[in-house]
Image (spheres, rainbow, N blue to C red):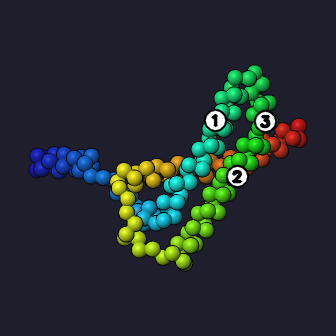
Amino acid sequence: MENYRLKYIAKDIKNWYTKPMKTPDIWQKFLKTYTAKVFACLIFLDLPFFLVYGNLFLESLSRFDVIEYINSNISDFLGWGLFSSLYKSIILILFAILEKYYIKPDYELITSTPKGQKLEQFSIILQIIYLIIVLVSLPITLLIVFILGCS
């Protein structure tokens, strides 16, 4: 009996390592839509934003008045963050409406390679994380600007 349990545990561990992880059914259905393909491509519109503000952040680290420099550029950062999330949201909503009511594609014909699907998933997850960060940092940034403006 003990030997059977060990074989079962070993088989279970082997299956855990060799079988691909199952993602929820809704996620798989979303990845087969044209909206997901568009959303995956929108990451290229965010790259200039990351490069410009990455450069500003590195420049602020080389100055002695880091806090003053960041405070002077915080409204620019807030504006660009809102702008980038706003145009992405508008494009996605319009494309989802078009896909739902006008295009009506056959989702079984929309295919991609496993490597391409992994890249799309990575791109979509990065953008979702970015949108969450922007939405969370918006009230915090407004609070900081309000406190600094009042003092």
Quarter occupied by residue 140: top right
Quarter occupied by residue 62: top right
* Residue in the foreground of this view, choosing between 89 and 23: 89
Quick check: 43 left or right of 150?
A: left
At a point 38% along the width and 59% down the height, the residue shown is 112
Where residue 61 sits: x, y (%)? 68, 26
Q: How far apart are marks 3 and 1 (CA)?
A: 16 Å
How many residues crowd around disc 3 within 10 Å: few (fewer than 14), some, or many (20 or more)? some
Identify the mark at residue 71; answer none if there is no mark: 3
What is the count of numbered marks? 3
Quickly name the residue at label 1: 54
At a point 60% along the width and 66% down the height, the residue shown is 93
Where residue 98 sits: x, y (%)? 56, 73
Quickly name the residue at label 2: 82
Where residue 87 sits: x, y (%)? 66, 58
Where residue 124 sits: x, y (%)? 50, 53
Give the structural element (helix, strand or loop) at label 3: helix
Examine the rendering and report whether any part of residue 106 can be seen: yes
Q: Which of marks 1 and 2 is nearer the N terminus?
A: 1
- Amino acid carrying label 3: it is Asn
- Amino acid carrying label 2: it is Leu
- Amino acid carrying label 1: it is Gly
* Residue 60, placed above or below residue 31: above
Farthest right residue?
150
* Residue in the foreground of this view, choosing between 101 and 13: 101
Give the structural element (helix, strand or loop) at label 2: helix
Quick check: 17 left or right of 90?
A: left
At a point 74% along the width and 48% down the height, the residue shown is 79
